[in-house]
């Protein structure tokens, strides 16, 4: 194993195709260069550790090892003076907050929450594509030029999170600005002024926090049928503090936005590289369901989970990982493990038994998975139906700096028109 492979994985030069590096990494299922994190890259070991109660997600339990090679990139976060979200907590604190958050979000207590959003979701998708049709920039000879990221994938999930939380329609534009600013903080421009970026990010966090605090207070006085009202009301003797509510709402905004943007953009890029599948999706709308599952395996929006720590010495594939050591779980590498998936580097929407790691697993599996799946299915299905002869203008496209939340920063395509 070459010692610099983690440096290579984090190197932006390899962002467009890290998969050969993951293949090399799997040759040593537990990689440790003596200073950095212990890196786990094979499917069964990653999945097992995601379910292992001896593994902590709370960075305060890290007591050994050197500096994290990811620096502040990590998994992102809510930032500011907010307490940790349940994403970075262990049981029982994690279980209490996640249980309270899940009650108004999905089954068994709110079984229709996501289903009831379907009409709103479809209207939003159609509206965004209509806006593209109204404002496309001609590139000559009847073709149109579209940036799928800026004009579609970025605004879509923020709009849906606003509707989920109960943000008034007149305030959604402000929410979009905050979301864009916080997203930029997770994907910093290396040439930008770091001090200025931090100030802008801090100001956005403060403004968002103050806005949410006011909205929470309003919902406590005048509850409505939205998720924020239900979270503010609590359940019986169980409730969140205002600070916990703010942290949870910020988590839903940041995590829900970033993963969905990547899922949709990686999905469209993959479809444009596989025009036969794109044609099938246009003719068979039902293909969207298995296709999104294969996308979550083939190009997962979250490539790895850093900030995992064993609470005791544990053994993985004959290697003892000391208590308190930093660990990385390489979801994207496990998703292409040939010991688990046949022809793993092939995109196959007809693949059977896709028990992928694209949304994590165990107690920290993606909380918003039902909504993310539905958003991607409807978004990609409608883009496939309405874009006439879409094709890439740049392949590979420019990628975001972030190695954890990996996806194109722009996805420029040309098409011959946009169907009604």
Image (spheres, helix red, strand yellow):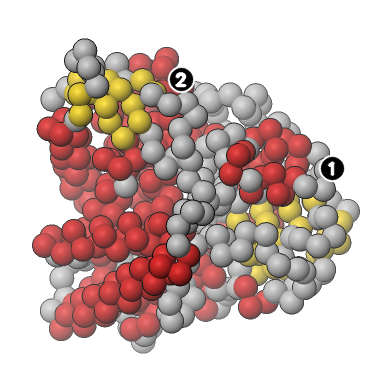
Quadrant position of residue 202: bottom left
> In x, y percent, where is residue 92?
55, 78
Horizontal side of residue 27 vs 80, given as left or right: right
Looking at marks 2 and 1 on the same chain, the residue that comes earlier in the sequence is marked by 1
Q: Is residue 185 above or below residue 156?
A: below
How dense is the environment of label 1, judged by Cα within 10 Å: few (below 14), some, or many (20 and up)?
A: few
Judging depth in this view, the residue of 410 and 190 nearest the camera is 190
Q: Is residue 252 above or below residue 42?
A: below
Quadrant position of residue 287: top left
Q: Secondary structure at mark 1?
A: loop
Where residue 1 is drawn, which disc sits there?
1
Q: Residue at x 22, y 45 (%)?
A: 121
Any part of residue 352 in sight = yes
Judging depth in this view, the residue of 274 and 342 nearest the camera is 274
How dense is the environment of label 2, judged by Cα within 10 Å: few (below 14), some, or many (20 and up)?
A: few
User: Which quarter of the rendering shows the N terminus?
Assistant: top right
Q: Is residue 60 above or below residue 35?
A: below
User: Which quarter of the rendering shows the C terminus?
Assistant: top left
Q: Is residue 404 above or below residue 307?
A: above
Q: Residue at x 12, y 32 (%)?
A: 134
Horizontal side of residue 15 vs 173, given as left or right: right
Any part of residue 293 in sight = no
Where residue 136 is drawn, which disc sits there?
none
Considering every residue shown, the one lying at the far right of the view is 318
């Amino acid at each position: 194993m070459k010692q610099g492979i983690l440096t290579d994985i984090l190197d932006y030069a390899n962002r467009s195709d890290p998969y050969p590096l993951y293949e090399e990494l799997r040759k040593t299922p537990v990689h440790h260069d003596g200073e950095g994190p212990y890196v786990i890259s094979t499917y069964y070991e990653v999945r097992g550790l995601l379910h292992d109660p001896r593994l902590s997600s709370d960075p305060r339990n890290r007591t050994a090892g050197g500096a994290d090679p990811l620096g502040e990139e990590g998994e992102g976060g809510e930032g500011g003076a907010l307490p940790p979200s349940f994403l970075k907590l262990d049981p029982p604190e994690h279980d209490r907050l996640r249980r309270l958050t899940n009650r108004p979000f999905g089954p068994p207590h709110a079984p229709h929450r996501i289903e009831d959003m379907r009409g709103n979701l479809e209207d939003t998708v159609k509206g965004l594509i209509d806006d593209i049709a109204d404002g496309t920039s001609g590139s000559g000879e009847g073709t149109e030029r579209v940036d799928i990221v800026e004009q579609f994938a970025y605004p879509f999930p923020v709009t849906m999170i606003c509707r989920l939380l109960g943000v008034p329609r007149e305030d959604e534009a402000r929410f979009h600005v905050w979301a864009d600013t916080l997203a930029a903080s997770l994907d910093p421009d290396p040439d930008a002024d770091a001090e200025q970026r931090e100030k802008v990010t801090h100001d956005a966090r403060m403004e968002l926090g103050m806005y949410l605090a006011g909205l929470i207070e309003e919902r406590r006085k005048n509850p409505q049928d939205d998720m924020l009202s239900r979270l503010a009301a609590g359940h019986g003797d169980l409730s969140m503090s205002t600070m916990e509510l703010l942290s949870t709402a910020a988590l839903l905004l940041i995590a829900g936005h970033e993963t969905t943007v990547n899922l949709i953009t990686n999905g469209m890029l993959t479809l444009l590289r596989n025009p036969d599948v794109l044609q099938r999706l246009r003719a068979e709308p039902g293909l969207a369901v298995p296709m999104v599952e294969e996308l979550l395996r083939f190009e997962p929006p979250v490539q790895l989970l850093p900030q995992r720590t064993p609470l005791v010495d544990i053994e993985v594939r004959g290697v003892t990982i000391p208590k308190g050591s930093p660990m990385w779980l390489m979801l994207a590498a496990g998703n292409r493990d040939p010991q688990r998936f046949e022809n793993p580097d092939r995109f196959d929407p007809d693949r059977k038994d896709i028990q992928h790691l694209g949304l994590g697993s165990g107690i920290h599996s993606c909380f918003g998975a039902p909504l993310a799946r539905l958003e991607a299915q409807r978004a990609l299905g409608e883009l496939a139906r309405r874009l006439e002869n879409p094709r890439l203008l740049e392949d590979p496209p420019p990628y975001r700096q972030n190695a954890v939340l990996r996806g194109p920063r722009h996805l420029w395509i040309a098409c011959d028109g946009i169907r009604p």
